[in-house]
Image: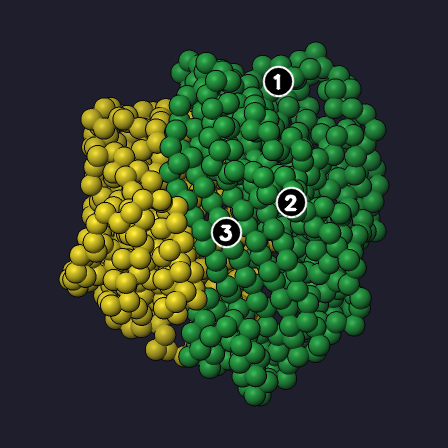
Chain colours: A yellow, B green
Amino acid sequence: MLDKGLAAEILDEALATGGDFAEIFVEDSKVQITLLGNGKVENARTRLTYGIGIRVFKGLFQTYAYTNLMDRENLLKTARKAAAALDGTKEIQCLNLVDFEFEDKHKIKISPFDYKHIQEADRYRQLSEQMFSLSPFCVRTEISNMYKKRKILIANTEGLWAKDEQNYMRIFINATTEKDGNSTNCHECIAGLMGREIFSQYDLQEKAESTIKRAVNKLSALNCPTGIMPVVIANGSGGIIFHEACGHGLEASRVAPKMSVFSDKVGQKIASDVVSAVDDATIPNAWGSINIDDEGTPTERKILIENGILKNYMVDKFNARKMNMRSNGSSRREDYTYIPTSRMSNTMILNGKSTPEEIIASTKSGLYVESIAGGNVHPSTGTFNFAVDEAFLIENGKITKQVKGAKLLGRGQDVLLNIDMVGNNMKISGGEYCGASSGQIPTTVGQPTIRVQGLTVGGQK
Amino acid sequence: MKINTWIEKLYQAAQNSGADEFQIIYLYTEERALELLSGNINTSMNSENQTVAIMLKKDGKIGCCESRNLDEIVIPEMIDSAIRNANIIDKAEENFFYDGKDAYASAEPYHPLAQKMASLNPIEFIKEVEKEILKADTRILPSTSVSFYTYKQKRIIKNSLGVNIEEEREKASSNACVLAQDGKYKENGWKSIYFDKKEDFNPSYLAKKAVEKAVSHLNGIKPESGPARVVFAPESLVNILQYLGHCLSAEKINKKQSQFAEKLGKTVASSIVTIIEDPLLKGGYRTSSFDNEGVPTYKKELISKGVLKTYLYSLKTAHQSGVKPTGNDADNQIGSNLRNVYIEKGTVSKEDLLKKVEKGIYIDGERGFIQGIRTNTSGDFSFSASGFLIENGEIGQPLEQFTVAGNYYQMFKDIKLIANDLEFQFNGVGSPTIWVDGLVIGGK
């Protein structure tokens, strides 16, 4: 990657018009994706990236320029482009760039790129065969394997010189089932900030079996009722409700310009007493974890809500200036073509005291949501919606018939106050990507089983 | 090293790689952005970027390596990766590059009005938009964002069979996002303009549209749950129509992931429905004379008076089905295989359509349609909507967000009336206002 001498020159050039801070972000990454359909490799592709983003701050204004023509002349030209949005004269000098040392909390054991992916394909060919053998209703399997090695370098005029290497691995399994002209699909995903040791941490076979079982069960799901009702959301992937309904509204990019329903609410009660939530980028090898963020700040475990009281936000350097806070290592971006900003990592509601059985038994009638397919939110109004993947009716305190095709919606600020029971079975789930202004980034969600009163359920009948 | 020299080197390396055929796709982009946030210019961006993809064909299999790393030393790595990727593919289906034997039609895509753009000062424009927003209504909050964006793109497809085509596109847009409050809840409103119409250069036009959207939705009530007559505004149908690209792609048909399988020549929609794809539409937002594979595009009816006329074929799927490719190769995004797709307009005005509906629900915004419909292949959907009641044949009270559920394939059959107000959105999807029965509303 870049050497310190050239980096200092670029930073110096970026400061020429009066910026009070300048930063460079260099990314050198490689991605390998293999896709199998019905056990046959249908597509394999490699993506290489090497580019730079140069950013300058002046007070509450930021300017950004990126390029991937990495010769000295063009890098200095790109720094001048970033500087050109300001029209002052040089005010500060770049400090000496000093190596930033930190502990690697996410060491990998077996680098995916040291392995011949042709052999990996054999593993998946077998897996697909097994999936077909599990049910006569399975009509198509899809398996994808992704490795990514992302080397980043962040240098800034405060003298920071930080490097990290992030290794990702993600396996996605999808099964389509069909019976009597009716067809559906289910997926499972395992993912981590880890290497090929992922195969010893997760039981792929078990995931494939559960995918088939769920896709077969879903075939006989009935139409979901419509209306306002109590909704019990299972542990794990159900945590997307917090991610959407609340998490995005706690990102400084929304909070600072007062475009979140949670702006200016630290210290206030925003959730019911049973709700405590964290965003923790330090969980070893979790898909949403990182050592340092894309501005070079070490990541943290942030308590967002404690017993219903708002404690903290996800904060990046630029918005920290507006909020008079410090960055807590939450600044992320998909790649060098995006301006980094505050984002989530591994975001979860913490354990409460109820058992999942108690929660269900105390619900006379309602909806039990087993898994959620994805959702979105307007943080400025709090309105969110998400698509239910698998759900069941709760009748007289018991889980009964499976239902399909439902949407859940509400306003985040109301939902947090309406969570009236929190289970003791917290689970982190997922290897999904969260999309927002700074691109698609790996995040996970998590929660114990929870119950929310008064959600709008939109079903087919 | 100049990018042209670099591509030439890659071309030579591909020639010497032992591949049977090869193709290079080059994409150059330039983007500039300005963002004004709650009274201050917050962000300015000015960037350029290039992506080169090499595709090598060996034994009927194509391996690909895409690179945004333009260091000379990666050329051998790109070739190696592409060959390795080709080798790992199981030869179940033959892949092709286009041989360029058909002529390309000329295409005039959308571009911003050049003369007017030249005299536009972006900073002044967005400041003026914000000023107009803040004075438009007392219920507007100071948290406003207005952005200005320009984009240029150059795309080259060059292959060993003789295809060597290039295309340039540009875009200019401004987006305003406003927040309004009256009572318990806030509502937001936004509008984008693309500087291809005279009114787009008037800051108060953009301001007014964004403000109207936010203010008109304040103090919404929850609609009754249950079946209702539903009217879709053109802008609410973007994702819903784009999903047709997914359902009609021969790839999805072959993989049993679409209910349009075995429906060619059969009735799949109400007899008043004609859906057209016109990649050569003059000034169209997605107009292009060739698709991602370099295959010429042409205008065609997808559904004609309710009857399904064609699937969408890439080179590979066309070969599998023994037909000509239709110029509809897809990248990964849903609907990206369609260029300027629209429902043909009807004869009644929007006002007359609403009168005929008399009582129902008017939808002006959809969210979460794709996320929901993806959870099955049956076409069942439930999305989150914004809108209004239709009372006495007119748009009435605003609604708090609600759900709309139904089945995708049934919905086309249940289209009752189509207005004459065809309008294109920026992703090249066009629709008039339409009335659909058989959908279920989820409210209180």
Query: Which-is-in-front pick, marks 1 and 2?
Result: 2
Q: On screen, A217 above or below B225?
A: below
Amino acid under label 1?
Leu
Q: On screen, B271 above or below A287?
A: above
- The CA distance from mark 3 to mark 1 is 41 Å
Point out which mark residue B114 bears. Answer: 2
Amino acid under label 3?
Glu
Q: Left of B105 or right of it: where is A256?
A: left
Q: Secondary structure at mark 2?
A: helix
Which residue is found at the position 25% from the left and 38% from the top? A321
- The CA distance from mark 3 to mark 2 is 17 Å
Which residue is found at the position 62% from the left and 74% from the top? B23
Which residue is found at the position 67% from the left and 33% from the top? B198
Residue B63 percent location from the top left of the image: 55, 75
Q: Secondary structure at mark 1?
A: strand
Judged from this view, the residue extending furthest toward the top is B392
Give residue A111's quadrant in the image: bottom left
Q: Secondary structure at mark 3?
A: strand
**Residues tagged by mark 3 and mark 2 found on one chain of the structure:** yes
Q: Left of A68 or right of it: where is A98?
A: left
Amino acid under label 2?
Ala
Q: Which residue is mark 3?
A: B31
Q: Chain of mark 3?
A: B
Q: Which residue is mark 1?
A: B389
- Which of the two discs, 3 and 2, labels the residue nearer the N terminus? 3
